Image (cartoon, rainbow, N blue to C red):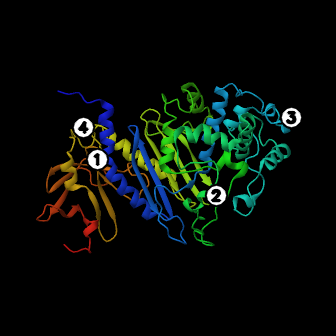
Amino acid sequence: MNHVPAQDITTARMDASLNYIRIWLQSQFDRHAIPGMQIAVHFGGSVRLSEAYGVTNLDTEEPVTRGHLFRIASQSKTFTAVAVLQLAERNLLHLDDPISSHICELVGSNVASVTVRDLLNHTAGIVRDVPNAAIDQVLAPTPDENQVLKTVIEHGFVFPPNATLKYSNVGYSLLGILVGRISSVGYNSFVKENIVEVLGLKNTGPDLDLDRVSDFVHGHAGPHARSPQAVLPLMTSRANASCGGFYSTAEDLAAYYAAHLMGDERLLNDDSKRLQQHAAWSSNSDDQAAARYGLGMARENFRGHTLLGHSGGHPAGQVSETVFDPDTGLIVSVLANGFGSPVGELVRGVLSLLYAGAADPTDPAGVGLVPRVIPTQPLELSADELSRFAGQYVDPIDEYHLAALGGKLLGISPDALDPIASAERYEVVSAGELRNVGASVFASAGESVTVVRNADDSVRRIQFGRSIMWPAERYEGPSL
């Protein structure tokens, strides 16, 4: 008997869950005011899912493709941190160097003793942004180096150094200036040569590429009453490139974050990656579950898993988040071109579905089960069994999904951004009957679901106690 490695089994189960994940993503996209979106999922050493939704611009209605370019805002900070750590690996700087030893304009200022490390982990205590509200409203040019340095010298500290986490875009603009000065080629050229080109990323760069303007999506204002989802102009980032100017695609970001997994030393050695990913500073010292920040990398615990990565919100109306699980190599990236788009929730929804899909279907305490209430020994369902029941079902007021996830049949409400929190588990009794073995005891735990089939074996309707639902693709109204 051939032994199949556990990792291969897990990968196969997650692969088997991707069809439903596509359905769930489309359902979520349809429910939220998202103009356009990209998503990529990477595991097992490659991109396993890559999708594009919606339009690049609500005025032109050009469809988003997987190759369109999104501004990834503060995800840029991870690139800047990599660049600084690369210079440290080459002994061109030390993390505990005072910033003024590399930026002469800061000598004698009240921030002269702030260290490179302080800036990387947002504990320098300096002002968050250049004080010009028009920048964030896309009404004025972004700051240049002189404006950044002037802001630091004139405004200095908000908090004492190393007293608390104090997120600062200005701090990362200073790091960009530092990288440019030490490398002598400028920040943009250094990151292109030492990160983008090393990984062969064809759709990633540190600032708006004027030669590829037609490839960029436009951002949109939030759907508020005064100006619902107004299309916003493209903008360059100048000295803000290092804190929030990068553009990329979901696929490129998946490939970039894959290089942060241990054992891949194309960008950094493993010692530097451990240093970057060790997150000591918390966003809320009273909450042990709160997100923490390392050297340009956020860290959190999610359903028993460690997640690393970064989110971003660009002033020109684009939001994004990419996270990776260092233990499983799972990476999820979501980019959207509208303020208010729930990218973080979508990332975690996809992760929830993948983790649920990867779980052992025969575990008596597994996902979607309440064994103490309904004693059961779950079985792994075959692809044929799952396909006979899985689908989107609707009635005049509601929608419900029977989802095939790694040998399990789960009932999922698409109204929730967290698809697993209230998921229900079903076992197959026969072609015409399912049994709910995992619902809340306030719902239909232990009860049967009747499945009425057509002559070709397709599902005609299903009945959950008092509810009758029909396959969404053939629903024409509440007739029997």
Q: What residue does disc 2 label?
A: 210
* Res. 438 mark: 1
Q: Residues within 10 Å of mark 4 (few under 14, many from 20)?
A: some
Name the amino acid type tagged 3. Answer: Val
Name the amino acid type tagged 1. Answer: Gly
Q: What residue does disc 3 label?
A: 107
Q: Which residue is pictured at 66% across the width and 42% down the height?
A: 189
Q: Residue furthest front?
A: 211
In the image shown, does 225 or 108 lie closer to the viewer? 108
Q: Nearer the viewer, mark 1 or mark 2?
A: 2
Pick the quarter of the image with the C terminus.
bottom left
Name the amino acid type tagged 4. Answer: Thr
Q: Secondary structure at mark 3?
A: loop
Determine the image quadrant of residue 433. Answer: bottom left
In three-dimensional space, the C-alpha distance between marks 4 and 2, rounded to whole angstroms, equals 55 Å
Ranked by sequence position, the earlier of labels 1 and 2 is 2
Q: Are marks 3 and 1 in contact (CB under 8 Å)?
A: no
Q: Residues within 10 Å of mark 3 (few under 14, many from 20)?
A: some
